[in-house]
Amino acid sequence: MDSIFHEKQEGSLCAQHCLNNLLQGEYFTPVDLSSIAQQLDEEERMRMAEGGMASEEYRTFLQQPSGNMDDSGFFSIQVIFYFVMWFVCVGLGANPLQQPRVPEPDDKSNVKFLIKTN
């Protein structure tokens, strides 16, 4: 490795800078993180609706702002976790949109991923 990548902090985009510094490159933008935050919000809304769209809990939930992002540049740990898992899945050759497979005990794909990233 010739140099260490370091993305300087801009605004309150801690999650973006954390991910890019961890993964050593300009992989993710605020737009990428916002897109996943909105998808997570929609998944949460659908789960809450399962309890009844007329319920008080659902109506209260709809009145609350996103717990996955805000206008200041905050992104939740769920958004960060999604992107770390996405990066790991891509490194292992898996489709990050599918359920991750459990590797067999003799599966060496994890070793290949570690070698590629080091």
Image (tube, rainbow, N blue to C red):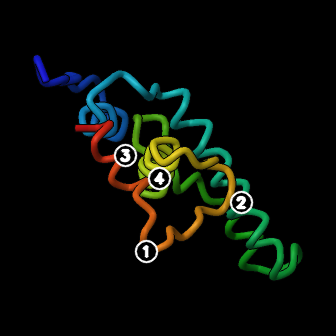
Could you say which quadrant of the image residue 45 lies in?
Answer: bottom right
Looking at the image, the residue that sits furthest to the top is 2
Instruction: Kindly report the distance in space between the C-alpha atoms of the residues bearing marks 1 and 3.
Output: 16 Å
Earlier-in-chain disc, 1 versus 2 = 2
Judge the density around disc 1: few (<14), some (14-19), many (≥20) Cα neighbours within 10 Å.
few
Pick the quarter of the image with the N terminus.
Answer: top left
Q: Which residue is mark 3?
A: 113
Residue type marked 1: Pro
Pick the quarter of the image with the C terminus.
Answer: top left
Reply above or below: 40 against 31. Answer: below
Which residue is rendered at x = 65% and y = 63% of the image? 99
Earlier-in-chain disc, 1 versus 3 = 1
Callout 2: SS:
helix
**Label pair 4/1, CB-CB below 8 angstroms:** no
Q: Which residue is mark 1?
A: 105
Residue type marked 2: Glu
Reply above or below: 106 against 77. Answer: below
Q: How many marks?
A: 4
Earlier-in-chain disc, 4 versus 2 = 2
Report x, y in % for residue 9.
Answer: 22, 26
**Label pair 3/4, CB-CB below 8 angstroms:** no
Judge the density around disc 4: few (<14), some (14-19), many (≥20) Cα neighbours within 10 Å.
few
Which residue is rendered at x = 44% and y = 48% of the image? 88
Residue type marked 3: Phe
